[in-house]
Image (cartoon, helix red, strand yellow):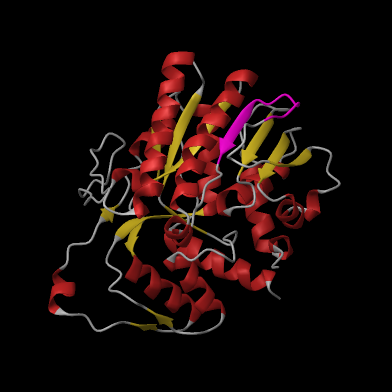
Amino acid sequence: MISIQTSSLYRDQIRQLAASITMPAGATVLVTGATGLVGSCLVDVLAATDTGIRVIATSRSLERLTQRFEYLLNDERIKLMRWDAADPLHCDDPVDYVIHAASNASPSLYEAHPVQTLLTNVEGTRHVLDFCQDKGARMLLTSTFEVYGNVIASPQGLQEDAPYTADLSTPRSCYPESKRCAEVLIQSYASEFGTDALIARLGSVYGPTMLDSDNKAHAQFFRKALAKQDIVMNSAGLPRRTYSYVIDVASALLFLLVHGETAQAYNVASSGESASIAEIAEHIAHIAGTYVQKPELSESDALQTAPNHTLNGAKIHALGWASAYSLDEGLRSTIAILQQSSE
């Protein structure tokens, strides 16, 4: 297992973000999905603060938790706790904030386990909402650009109130539809019970905290780059979306946790930072000094209209948040950190 803490670049980026956190001193933050791409970065950032913030990190696997956060095992501010989203969430400690990042986040899992994926998102969110209602804690749900459906964004990008088109013809819909349901649960609990909860809609998140099991296209591109192998494209790679570096995503989530409005949804997006899958492949290959092998396309493939999930980030920017990393900086950081971590 790669130990990301051996990377001086990663530690520096974490410390830089931790120094900017505006969360009240001494607050307790519970993070679900703490061994995932986003959740693990959040725990690293919160653990690096020097304002007495306590962290409760949960995962389905206590073994993975202890492996990932071995460097924090003797830190009394950090508590590692097993929790499965299928079960009610219980914790005796006082909790001020919850970031709910637990979810099946791999397309292969959506296809292999659509029922588990759906129930994890819906039942897991309900259990976290019940927990927050009992604790009087504020909750932030990590959602996805996929809730907008198969759409083509305008030049301004998708705004939070954009209509969506549901595709219910395949079990693959288990992920976006269950995330939409989780969002409605947030709004319903806020309306009926006064629960203090809100939503962050993420684009395609990438970074050095990605899991070995991550089979998203950009994760596979990074692995090829690290191995100094050419990237082999299996399609034209036309779908366009917002790509966000995981440090920026952690920054946005911690910002919204303090400054976001109850029951509102916010796109987490940097202005002008969208790209197609093919463009990401070319960019990563250029950084690594390798090449992209493209497939031969039929005439119908070449004329196909691809989804565009570019997100409009004006709403979160109006609150005062801004990203720190350009797409180029994020991609280069990811490769550099993974290289340092594997040395």
- Position of the N terminus by quadrant: bottom right
Residue at (44% x, 78% y) in the render:
285
| Position above or below: 212 against 126 | below
The residue furthest top is: 193
- Position of the C terminus by quadrant: bottom right
Occupied quadrant, residue 132: top right
| Position above or below: 286 against 247 | below
Q: Is residue 109 on the magenta stretch?
A: no
Q: In this view, does 69 lie to the left or right of 157?
A: right
**Residue 263 position in % (x across, y down):** 42, 25
Where does the magenta region start and end? Answer: 90-100
Residue at (34% x, 50% y) in the render:
173
Residue at (41% x, 22% y) in the render:
188
Q: Is residue 99 on the magenta stretch?
A: yes
Nearer to me, 21 or 53: 53
Residue at (43% x, 35% y) in the render:
182
